Amino acid sequence: MAEPQFSRAQPEYKSCIDLDEYDRRPALSADELTVVRRWREDNVFITKRQAPRLHKPLADILYRGDLDRANGQRALKYLLLQVAQRESPYWGWDEDLWVEIINSSPVLKHTGMVPQLIAVAYLLCGFRSLYKIGRNVATAVVARMVFGAESVDAECERLYSAFTRVGFVCQTVRPIVPSVFAAVALQGENPKLESFDKELLEYTRDCYAGQHIAKRIGMLANGLAAMGLTPKIIHFRAYQPRHGTESDNIDPEWMTWCRRWLETTTLREGSRRAIYNTLTRVGIWLSREHPEVTSPEHWTVSICADYLATVDRLRIGDWAGSTFDYRLIPTVGQPLQAPTKVAYYQVMRRFLSDVQSWEWARLRCNPRYHLSTPKNIAKYLGVNPRTIDDAAWLKLTWASLNIEPNDLSPECFYPFALLQAIAVVWTHAGLRSNEIARLRVGCTREQSEDVVDQSGNVVPAGQVCWLDVPEGKTSAAYTKPVSHAVHKYVAAWLKKRASPRKHLDRRTGEYVHFLFQLRNRPIAKEVLNQTVIPLLCKKAGIPLEDSKGRITSHRGRASAVSMLASVPQGMTIFDLAKWCGHTSVQSTMSYVRSKPTQLAGAFAKADQAARMIQIVIDQDVIAAGATKDGAPWKYYDLGDSYCSNAFWSTCPHRMACARCYFNIPKPGAKGVVLAAQQAANRLLEEVWLSPEERDAVSGDVEALDGMLNKLRDKPTPDGRTPAEISATSGPLASSLSAGSE
C-alpha cells in the first residue's frame, strides 16, 4: 500500500531517538560476526561490551525509565539472538522480515514483548505496517514507547473533553480512544491532533480494514470536528456500495444512459439511487433476453409488453448481478409482491419519459400507456398502515411516559432523556420517523393563553403545546397542537443536550440545530425501530409483534391518527388532514380505519333492523274497546297483503303465507282502508328467525322446499292446512308464492 502524501502542513514533532547518533551499517564486521556466532550457543550471557553498535540503540529505546525493564531485557536479548541467527544487523531488515520475526516466533506467544519489538522496528527501521501483525499489537502501548506517555495521555485527554461536549459517554469512550488515536498517530508519525486530517484518517482506515480500529475512525473524526480541527464531520462508509457496478454483465451503452440520467435528475438522493439500481437490474435482463436493446431508442411496444409480462412473473433474485449475493436473502426465489412490481413499472416509465422530455432521444413507444400498470396487479394496491392493536398501543403510550433509567440495557449508549423524549414524541405527535429525526431545537412552545374554537369551547392554557414540524414528505413546514407532555420531555432533554455545531438538513438545504443530536451528529431515523420501540415493548410487557405483524414507527403514526378519529366527538377528516400534514384528504382516509368494536356495533344495529317488519295498529278498534270481543287491531304488512293474526311473528307459515282467513289482500276493501286510515300507527317489530328460516332467506332453494314440505300438513291459524287451502283456492304453489317472505 503506497504511503499517502498529506498536503496540509504538519505540526512540528521531534522524535526522542536521533538516528544520526548511531552506526547504521547494514552488514556485520568480522569481529561482530565472531561475537554473534557465540550468542547462538545455549545459555550464553550477552553484554553491551560484546557488540556496542548493536546493543546501545536497543538499550536507548527499551531501558527508558518509564518502561517495564524486565520486558525490555527480554526483548533486547531476543532481537540480538535474531541478529545472530540471520548474521545481519536489524538495520538492514525490511518490513516483511520484521512481520515474519514477530508473527512466527513461538517465544512471543505468551510474552508481553510484542509492543517493545514494534517500537524498536518503528524508531530504528522505519517500520509502519503495524496492521500486518497478527498478534496483540497494543497500539496504545507502542505509541507511549514511541512518542512518550505524557504526550499521548495529553492528546487523549483533549479528545475525552471533546467527546463529552458532543454527547459521548466517557465510560464507554476511555477504553477505546487510546488504541484508535495511537493507530492514527503512528501512521502519521505525529501524536499531535492538529496533524490528523481527512487523508490520514482515510489512509489509516484502509490499512486497518476489517479490524475494530477501522470501525472507530469515524468516532475519532467526531472528536476532531468538536475541537474545530476539521471544518466538518468526516463521514465514512462502513462498507463499499454494492449497487451500480454491474458493468461486467450489462451493456456499456445502457450503463452510460443510466449514469447520465442519475447525474441529471433532480430527485432526492435516496430516490434517484433506488431508481438507478433498478435500471441496472433491467440492464441485466436486457443483456440476457434482448441484447439488441442498448438504449431507450430501442424500446418498442413489443419490448414494453415483454417487460410487463416478465416483471409480473419475476422472482426475487432472478435479476441478480455479480456484485450482490442473494444467498443471504431468506425470501430469494419467492414471487414479487404487487407494490414491488408497480415500482419496477414506475421506474421504466419515469426513465423513458425523462429521456423523451429532455429530448435525449425519440422513443418508439408511449411509456405512460405501454408501460402502465396492468389492472390485475393494480387491484391489489392500497395504502394499509396497519394500526397497532388498541390494547398494545395504550400500553406503549403509558410506557413512553413511565420508562426509567434502569429500563435501559447496559449496552445502550443513548442518554435516557433522549430516548424518553423520542418515545413521547412518537406516541403523542403522530409524526413520521424522518420528521422526528429532523425536528429542530425550539420546535415546541407552551400554550400560554386560553384558546376558544368556533363552537365556543375553551381549551385552557397549558393543556396543549405547539409543535413545529419541518418540511416533510407531503407538506411544507407547519405547526400542530400536541399533548403538553411532548413539551415537558423535550425540555428535559434540552437541559442535558450538548451544544454542537449545526448540521445540514438534506431535504431543505439548511444548516440547523437538530433537536435529537448526539455525538456531534443527528440521530438516524432507525433509532425508533431498533432502540425506542423495543424499549417501550419491554417496559409495557408486550411482544414486538401484534396481530398484524411487527410494531414499527409508521404503524404508531397510523394508530395515533386513528385514535383521534375514532373517539366520540373525534376530529373531522379535514382537521386530521391538517394535523397529519397531508395536502389531500384522500391520504388521510387511509389512516382512518373503523375499529373492530365499532364495526361490530354497527353490524349489530344493522342486523337487528334487517329483522324488523312494519305493523299497523288500528286505534279506532282499541278506542271502541272491541279488542275484548276478539276484533283484529294489529296488522302485519306482508307486502301484497296484511295478516291480522296478532301472533304472526311466531306463526310457522309466516315465510310462505298460506292465505288463511287472517290474510287480508291489499287490493281488497279492508286493505285499502288500512292503508288510508289516518288513526293507524305504523310501527316496527323485530322478528327472530329460526335456523331453517335463515337458510330460506339466504336463498337456499333446497332449504325452502324442505320447509314447505314440512308445513304442507301443519294447520294454519284458522285451522286448515295449506293442502286444504290449496284445494279450495287454487294450486298450492300459487298460493304459497303469493305470500310474503
Image: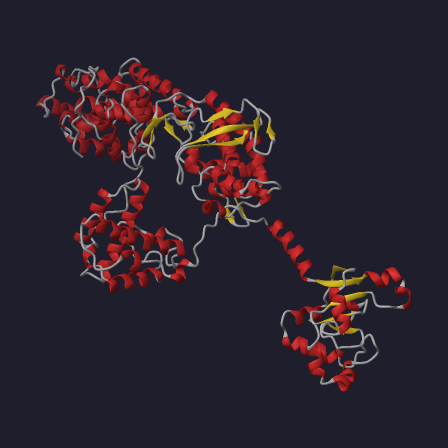
In front of the other: 108 or 684? 684
The outermost residue toward the right is 629
Residue 509 appears in view = yes
Number of on-image labels: 0
Please say if 120 is above or below 635.
above
In front of the other: 53 or 454? 454
Horizontal side of residue 256 vs 67, given as left or right: left
**Considering the image in quadrants, where does the C terminus appear?**
bottom right
The outermost residue toward the left is 30
- Report x, y in % for residue 200: 23, 27
- Report x, y in % for residue 101: 22, 32
Residue 117 appears in view = no
- Report x, y in % for residue 389: 57, 46
The outermost residue toward the bottom is 727
Horizontal side of residue 327 vs 259, given as left or right: right
Please say if 360 is above or below 87.
below
In front of the other: 471 or 192? 471
Residue at 21% x, 25% y: name it. Answer: 121
In front of the other: 97 or 207? 207
Residue at 60% x, 31% y: name it. Answer: 456
Please say if 475 is above or below 450.
below
Please say if 161 is above or below 620.
above
Q: How is the image coloured?
A: secondary structure
**Considering the image in quadrants, where does the N terminus appear?**
top left
- Report x, y in % for residue 206: 24, 34
In the rendered image, which quarter is residue 80 located in?
top left
